[in-house]
Image: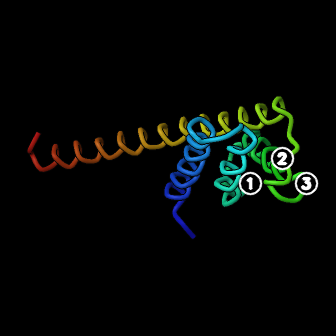
Amino acid sequence: MARPELRHSWVHQRLTVAVETLTTGQGRLQERLVHAGMTLIALRPEDFHDVQQRKRFEAVVDALTNEGTIAATTAILSDEHASEIASDIFALATWAQHEFIGKQAIRDATDKQLVDEAMRRAGLS
């Protein structure tokens, strides 16, 4: 099993790719949702420790697979519903970005504290 920080980094990366697909991809939003959805299906509800974000992820997956496949579902989505799903994907990516940056900042601060302490003990500071 992957270390939690590596798994979280991977979740963040998947969501970032999905948003990039939605914002820079070719075609109608429904077509871009197919590609974004294919990026997201590798994720699992357990990847979202926040209950609200887990529910949002599950709702996105359900909305994208309501007709069996992502392609079949997105083919019949209204522009409004497609936009709502895209907004939810963006919200998940924003949450993951904050989580990733926050955890990285904590690790960096902890690493700096450890280095500072080691240097102090060695008489180098």
Identify which amino acid the numbered label 1 is placed on: Pro
Label 2 element class: helix
Q: Residue at x 68, y 44 (%)?
A: 32
Q: Nearer the viewer, mark 2 or mark 1?
A: 2
Instruction: Give the x, y percent position of residue 98.
Output: 54, 35
Which image quarter: residue 16?
top right
Report which residue position mark 3 lands on: 67
Report which residue position mark 2 lands on: 75
Question: Of callouts 3 and 1, which one flags the residue occurring earlier in the amino acid sequence?
Answer: 1
Per the model, the C-alpha gap separating discs 2 and 1 is 25 Å
Q: Residue at x 20, y 49 (%)?
A: 118
Nearer to us in this view, 71 or 53: 71
The residue furthest front is 27
Q: Nearer the viewer, mark 3 or mark 2?
A: 2
Per the model, the C-alpha gap separating discs 3 and 2 is 10 Å
- Give the side of residue 94 with respect to residue 112, left or right: right
Q: Nearer the viewer, mark 3 or mark 1?
A: 3
Identify which amino acid the numbered label 3 is placed on: Glu
Circles 3 and 2 in contact, beta carbons < 8 Å: yes
**Local crowd size for mark 3, using a 10 Å CA cut-off: few (<14), some (14–19), many (≥20):** some
Identify which amino acid the numbered label 2 is placed on: Ala
In the rendered view, tell whether residue 38 sits above or below residue 30. Answer: below
Question: Of callouts 3 and 2, which one flags the residue occurring earlier in the amino acid sequence?
Answer: 3
Report which residue position mark 1 lands on: 45
Instruction: Give the x, y percent position of residue 51.
Output: 75, 43
Question: Of callouts 2 and 1, which one flags the residue occurring earlier in the amino acid sequence?
Answer: 1
